[in-house]
Image (cartoon, rainbow, N blue to C red):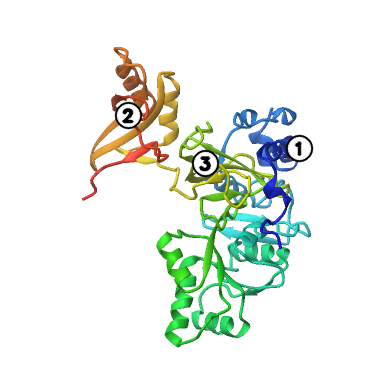
Amino acid sequence: MSMFFDALETRSPQQREADLLARLPAQIAHAQQHAPAFARILQGVDAAAITSRAALARLPVTRKYELLQRQRDQIGQAGQPGHSPFGGFATHGFGKAMPRVFSSPGPIYEPEGTRPDYWRMARAIYAAGFRPGELVHNCFSYHFVPAGSMMETGAQALGCTVFPGGTGQTEQQVQAMAELRPAGYIGTPSFLKIILEKAAEQGIALPSLTKALVSGEAFPPSLRDWLAERGVAAYQAYATADLGLIAYETEAREGLVLDEGVIVEIVRPGTGDPVAEGEVGELVITTLNTDYPLIRFGTGDLSAVLPGQCPTGRTATRIKGWMGRADQTTKVRGMFVHPGQVAEVAKRFPQILKARLVVSGEMANDQMALQVETTETAEGLARLIGDAIREVTKLRGDVQLLPPGSLPNDGKVIEDARSYR
């Protein structure tokens, strides 16, 4: 049996890019016509002209907090014409086209459509070693959040049978695994560790459990190795309740390979501006899901593109995985300062190649300095930048001019270096 889920995984990068961009104008037009929120967000946009990444990058980014706010506003208008608990982002209402609705922290409500493998998880499950005809023990929650359904529908699309274990009830999980002998586990890595520890405590062998797909939390190498020592090869998937699968790990264990059904950009936090390849920034996703057509959706997660292709032969772009959160908003002297303000200051000066705001000192005695990479040290430049800082943030800040390459590549636009003792 092939190590690849389908032929899409081995397309040439050029063919993949052409295929994705060819679908983009129709998706944008569909969102404008059938999702009221995008009718407003993309008002005046000529969908037919969005045929390149450069054109896509000119569209606004919609971040999770904006989606939440639109949903809250709509829920507050319940009973009025056009009301939707999805904030106008879904293209269907309740009924046959939307068999389930889920809730994530916020709360944010997410629709599930009727397409097989709606969340596109089968690809990641296959890459983790699962094959048709196997039993999968699914320990993601089936309550409120979509994680359980995301994995179940993906496994079923692959041709697997699913045991819906859900969360908790560790002793019963061990018993079911011992008696049903599943081929593998799907769930959080920490719960898998708990299950294996409980099985060992009870003296129960789980010889069939040889593979796992994990997600939902950090998966450090130490835990990966701990599982491997107990005969379980575990791989990661990066997915969200809004977007479904974004990227997945392969047996090469060199970053995460991007899913075939999304267009991924990495932008400077607080902006919609793509960063150079290899630079850490915020993941912004455009999904080709027609039921919930999120266009340039800011995940709030940091990552970076890895050079080259996956040693397994998959040709899609790889990312490093989750590297932190992009929302670095902090409060300085009673005022909120956010990455978008740092970007606004930097955009006023073409001499600035990169900028990072460092907040130091102690609480109630904050000091703020904007570190900027520049090749120019013209007299008065620092003063002009300082004036812009005050105008944009309403706060005074020092300016430090640094040579190119001085700032770390970690995606931080605001660094809170204060002492909280």
Instruction: Answer above or below: position of 192 versus 181.
Output: above
Disc 2, SS:
strand
Give the image quarter of residue 197: bottom left
Q: Residue furthest top?
A: 379
Q: Measuring 57% from the left and 56% from the top, which residue is drawn there?
A: 250
Where residue 109 appears, as percent x and y from the top left, is 61, 55
Say which mark, if any, is on residue 370.
2
- Few, some or many residues within 10 Å of mark 2 (<14, 14–19, 20+): many
Q: Percent x, y for residue 263? A: 63, 41
Residue 87 lies, in percent from the top left, at 63, 47
Q: Nearer the viewer, residue 85 or 408?
A: 408
Secondary structure found at label 3: strand
Sequence order check: which comes first, mark 3 or mark 1? 1
Asked if the residues shown at circle 3 and circle 1 are in contact, with their CB atoms under 8 angstroms apart, the answer is no
| Callout 1: SS | helix
Relative to 111, does residue 305 appear above or below in the rendering? above
Sequence-first tag of 1 and 2: 1
Q: Quadrant of the N terminus?
A: bottom right
Measure how far apart labels 3 and 1 are at the Cα level: 27 Å
Q: Amino acid at mark 3?
A: Val
Disc marking residue 305: 3
- Identify the residue at image location x=32%, y=22%: 386
Who's the residue at 33% across and 20% down the image?
Answer: 387
Q: Which residue is mark 1?
A: 26
Instruction: Tell me residue 270's x, y (percent).
Output: 47, 35
State the separation of the CA atoms marked 2 and 3. 26 Å
Name the residue located 32 percent from the left edge and 29 percent from the top edge. Answer: 371
Mark 1: give few (<14), some (14-19) or many (20+) Cα within 10 Å.
some
